[in-house]
Amino acid sequence: MTDHARQTGTLWGLSLGPGDPGLITRAAWAALQRQDAVWVYPVRSGKTPSYALDIAQRAELAPPEIHLPLLFPMTHDGEKLARAWLKAAQTVLPWLQAGRDVLFLVEGDASTYATFGHLARTVRSLDEHVPVQVVAGVNSFTAACAEVGEPFAEQDDTVAIIPAAYGVSAIDRLLGDFDTLVLMKIKPLIEDLLDWLQARELLAGAHFIERVGALDERRLSGHELLALRGSKVSYLSLLIVKNPHRVRGERIKGCLKKSGPGLAEPAALKQISTRTEPAEAAAA
Ligand SMILES: C[S@@+](CC[C@H](N)C(=O)[O-])C[C@H]1O[C@@H](n2cnc3c(N)ncnc32)[C@H](O)[C@@H]1O
């Protein structure tokens, strides 16, 4: 390690889970006890509170002496976003260069559609010596599955995690291939998604979960989702769709089919099949 790297503080992406303080990991909890580190947390505007900070506060964790919000606006305007990321990076860089660790509080998991990636990249573009570390956490969709009592995936199920911004037709194209669809960032498309769920007869296996783990969590399943028509939903909401129309292909040894006598198994398939013996699949 160079002298420079030794003196520089670490930028931490600290996952806090999706809302229930009970889902903060022990690693994140330990980091949050530190009074020598700086806390920063994302806000979408000067008027909106930080959901990540709220999780820490509901866990009755006291912020350290230095703690402040960083603005990450909700926009697709690339220039505005780049300006916000630069400003955020310039805010935290002096602490890092002075040897202080900076904890960026993230709702859910810091590697899952999180603003942390933008901050880390921008900081590193200003000073490549800044060490970056992530504490992994529980993400919103696995917590949502637990709340609604649906498995995220079983045995050899396929799962697609899709930001709904690609539009309903893009999502529709995945129906043949996936057993579970997780639709994120659904707020602007909720009416179109309800139409689609009805038209494709998917409502029975659909769940809407808003602010999972927060005090005002909301859950609707099956035909209850139609109550969302004409109403506003939170940005922090998602859909879990269990898809009865998935077309299953023939499965390779380890699940069902063994290669017959005289049929040489290609090396690549052999590798896959030794990794998924039935006993392992059952235990997973
Ligand atoms: C920028 S992504 C953040 C994802 C988050 N880092 C995670 O690990 O789940 C924001 C989207 O994640 C989903 N989301 C995040 N937190 C949520 C929560 N507490 N309840 C429901 N959906 C949530 C929503 O679809 C929201 O539009």
Image: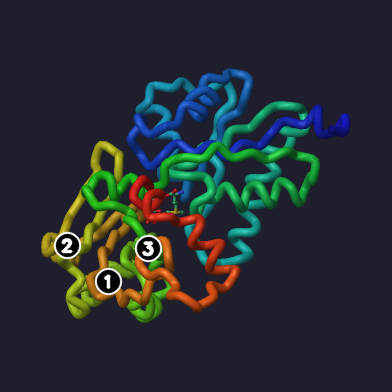
Identified by mark 1, the residue type is: Leu
Question: Which percent across, then down, holds residue 199?
Answer: 19, 80
In-front residue for pair 125/202: 202
Indicate the secondary structure of the residue bearing disc 2: helix
Identified by mark 2, the residue type is: Leu
Decide: is 142 above or below 265: above
The residue singled out by tag 1 in the image is 193
Quadrant housing residue 208 = bottom left
The residue under the point 65% across, 56% down is 83
The residue singled out by tag 3 in the image is 255
Q: What is the C-alpha distance between the residues marked 2 and 3?
A: 35 Å
Q: Is residue 50 visible?
A: no
Q: Is mark 3 within 8 Å of ligand 1?
A: no
The residue singled out by tag 2 in the image is 225
Q: Is mark 1 within 8 Å of ligand 1?
A: no
Horizontally, residue 264 falls left or right of residue 96, namely left
Q: Is residue 180 visible?
A: yes
